[in-house]
Structures are given as structure tokens and as C-alpha cells.
Amino acid sequence: MAIDVCRVRADSGERAAQISVVNFYGKIVFDSLINPGPGIESLRYEFTGITTAHTYHAPKLGKVAQSLIRKLKGRRIVGHGAKSDLKLIKLQRYDPTF
């Protein structure tokens, strides 16, 4: 599985606004927008394509993380900065066996 987390800039640092996971064949197996909460300084639209309208009704990170954990269980994870992404979405205890 390959993971990517779209990050937005907030007054307290970076937050996740979208998590996507594809399998070995490039098929999307998980894709969810995330409501990053208050204090957002930049959605980095030019890189993420995410607008406030996209995230307004999106679920919070905790709910998304629960679903993600079920998808990743027992799987190896790769990705550009995957360790940093897992830390950002508070799954640093997840042992993906990089």
C-alpha cells in the first residue's frame, strides 16, 4: 500500500486535509477528505486542489483514522515521507514495516 497525506498550514503547524491509499496495482483503496478544524492559514490549493467547501462537512481525523487502520492492518506501507505522514495523522504507533 502507498499512502499520501495532503497537508494544510494551520496556526499551530501542519494538519491533514486528505488521506489517500493505493494498492500495488495503483487502485485506490482508501481516499478521504478530513476537516482540519479551525485556525487554517492556507489550504495550499495550488498543490492540494482542496477548498474550504471540500473540508467543511468532511469527518474529523479521529474518525478517518479508525477506518484507515482497518485498511492498513497487516499491510506494508510505502510513500514519500510515509513516516512523517503517519506521525501527522497520529498513527506513529502503527508498525507498517517500511
Image: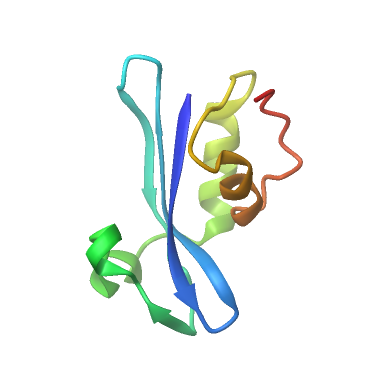
* Residue drawn 61% across the image and 45% down it: 86
Farthest residue toward the top?
25
Q: Would you place residue 73 above or below residue 87 in this image?
A: above
Residue 45 horizontal/vertical position (percent):
26, 68
Q: Is residue 84 left or right of residue 67?
A: right
Residue 54 horizontal/vertical position (percent):
27, 64
Q: Nearer the viewer, residue 2 or 73?
A: 2
* Residue drawn 56% across the image and 27% down it: 77
Q: Which quadrant, please, contains the C terminus? A: top right
Q: Nearer the viewer, residue 97 or 74?
A: 97
Q: Quadrant of residue 58 in the image?
A: bottom left
Q: Nearer the viewer, residue 43 or 68?
A: 43
Q: Is residue 4 left or right of residue 91?
A: left
Residue 21 horizontal/vertical position (percent):
42, 34
* Residue drawn 61% across the image and 56% down it: 88
* Residue drawn 45% across the image and 29% down it: 2
Q: Would you place residue 32 above or below residue 27 in this image?
A: below
